[in-house]
Amino acid sequence: MRQPLVIGNWKMNGSLSVTSELIQSMGAGIDGKISCEIGLCVPFVYLSIAVKQAQGLAIGIGAQTVSEFPNGAYTGEISAPMLAEVGCKWVLIGHSERRQYFNEGDDQLVLKLKAAQNAGLCPVFCVGETEQEKKSDKTFEVIQRQVSALLADKEVDLDNLVLAYEPVWAIGTGLTATPDEAQAVHAYIRDLLTLNVDESAQKVRILYGGSVKPDNAQSLFGQQDIDGGLIGGASLNAEDFLTICRQAK
Ligand code: PGA
């Protein structure tokens, strides 16, 4: 059995007061109707306060990216041991905005993922096709390339990893993959894992992301291979986020 997981990704949004207020409201709203695990990925500078605020609440704090290097002369970067030290549990790796705007490629992302695992963090590795790739029927090809980069590296620990399928055309656009479309890609990812690894592939959680909202979460999360969501915009509103969490059963 895979416990559903819902992770919020605030991206470059928020402030000190928003961080405190949102986590407080989320914490106050977590009740018996929520059975999923919950994560929140906040901007680096708010991590410490978020960890403090989330103490005693069933919310694990995470970062949105990480350096592939452990320390040294890499001005502006933040390492995985630093994230672990301030109390992070999660880190997003390869979000499409990192791939697109910061040119992070598959090889570098696998290094980041291993750095995260070595520091005891749980990486959430994001994959997904662009609108152009979808239009030219390349969805499965792109997913195969991105997932294979992971599987080709035998040092990657598949027991400590979450995958997220986020079609790039659905992120922040209000468009979502239909539940059937999303399920087809999730099942394909699980097949790739099973083929390359073994039965432990059944344990890997695969989240869906891209305009998940309170009114579409249930139909997406109801699919067999969708184990929860990676939530951008709707994670900046405590009530919306909790409503989404309640649908992940
Ligand atoms: P969205 O973002 O929910 O605002 O589409 C999802 C994400 O980028 O992880």
Image (tube, rainbow, N blue to C red):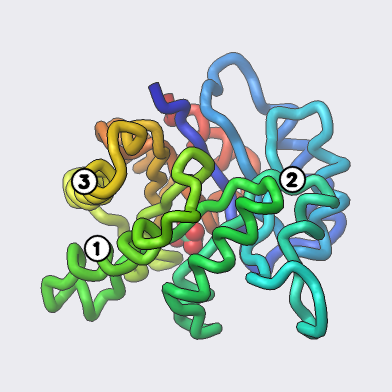
Q: Position of residue 55 (x, y in %)?
A: 83, 33
Which residue type does callout 3 highlight? Leu
Q: Position of residue 143 (x, y in %)?
A: 27, 63
Which residue type does callout 2 highlight? Leu
- Residue at the extreme left of the image, as rendered: 137
Q: Nearer the viewer, residue 2 or 8?
A: 2
Q: From the image, tell me which residue sits under label 3.
A: 195
SS for tag 3?
helix
Q: From the image, tell me which residue sits under label 1.
A: 144
Of the image marks 1 and 2, the number of the one nearer the N terminus: 2
Q: Nearer the viewer, residue 150 or 83?
A: 150
Q: From the image, tell me which residue sits under label 2.
A: 22
| Horizontal side of residue 205 vs 136, given as left or right | right
**Quarter containing the C terminus:** top left
Mark number, residue 2: none
Of the image marks 3 and 1, the number of the one nearer the N terminus: 1
Residue at x 61%, y 51% (from the top left corner): 117
Can residue 236 be seen in this snapshot? no
Q: Is residue 190 above or below residue 97?
A: above
Choose mark 1 or mark 2, whichever is in front: 1
Location of residue 238 by image quarter: top right
